[in-house]
Image: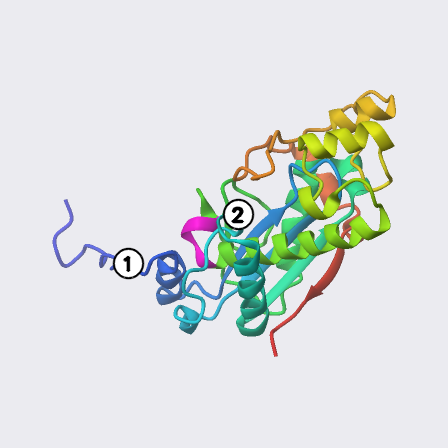
Amino acid sequence: MLGPSLRPPRAVVRSAGNWTLQSVLQRHGLGPVAGVDEAGRGASAGPLVVASCVLRPTDTKALDGLTDSKLLSPASREEYFTKIRRRALDLCVVVIPPEEVDRRGVHIANIEGMRRAVAGLSVDPGYVLTDGFPVRGFGRPTLAVPKGDRVAACVAAASVLAKVTRDRLMVELDDVRPGYGFAVHKGYCTPEHDAALNALGPCPEHRFSFANVAAVAGRGPLSGLVHNGSSPDEGSGAGATPSGDEDDELWAEPDLMDVVMGGPSR
């Protein structure tokens, strides 16, 4: 056993709610801390949206109550979205169109979207927190946080950015593709969506690699793809981990993801 003089000092962790993890990393020189999360993984129509966010350590009071976007009311999500856009040190949102989800599979597209979202930050993060499952390839230390969007404020912020962005896109899509109810169910597999899908058939914004869409379209599901069985509430990070070959492929065509907004707040 090491003597007292040879033992490394213990880290002191002071509880600060869902800011605790970020605060500890900052105090030990591992900041800025970026959180990453997505919205739309389990939907059978519309884009997959991934966001990264770096919060200012001094904004704990300004963003009090920030949590997983799925636990907030639509009005609260919009309010936090505005605050986060105004106060965040940096953020980036990536929109992945349904045809790319079909081509790559939702899990692979999700991981690449996370990498692009972090790469799109102007601020170079010292640490990256992901929601639920580990992700390689950020080029910096990373930690998978179970229920990350509930216990890490920066992940919760990314969750809000991704969900509000995607919800707005689905409301716009409802005007372009009337009859499907996209403004209501946001493309998730609800009885109303299934009824409209069966009555109208799939539109170009549906994900044809999903079994329910492929069945209505008269196609078999595309082979070689892995999809989550996420519900409209979007479970936290379940899904297959890509093989090494799939991981290498992700870096082959990075221009297929469209970074639609981001940069330091003004």
Q: Which one is earlier in the sequence, the residue at label 1 or at label 2?
A: 1
Residue at coordinates 80% horizontally, 37% vertically from top-left? 206
Q: Give the range drawn in magenta.
A: 149-153
Residue at coordinates 48% horizontally, 49% vertically from top-left? 71
Amino acid type, mark 2: Lys
Q: Percent x, y for residue 199?
A: 84, 29
Is residue 117 depicted above or below 45 in this figure? Answer: below
**Disc 1 secondary structure class:** loop
Q: Percent x, y for residue 246?
A: 70, 35
Amino acid type, mark 1: Ser
From the viewer's perspective, is 32 left or right of 210? left
| Label drawn at residue 15 | 1
Q: Percent x, y for residue 86?
A: 57, 73
Q: Is residue 61 something one can see in this rendering?
A: yes
- The colour style of the image is rainbow
Residue 16: name its quadrant.
bottom left
What residue did someone put label 2 on?
A: 70
Q: Main secondary structure of the magenta part?
A: helix
From the viewer's perspective, is 259 left or right of 162? right
Marks 1/2: CA–CA distance: 24 Å
Residue at coordinates 58% horizontally, 45% vertically from top-left? 136
Circle 1 crowding by C-alpha within 10 Å: few under 14, some 14–19, many from 20: few
**Disc 2 secondary structure class:** helix
| Label drawn at residue 236 | none
Q: Which residue lies furthest to the left in this view?
A: 3
Which image quarter holds the N terminus? top left
Q: Percent x, y for residue 14?
A: 26, 60
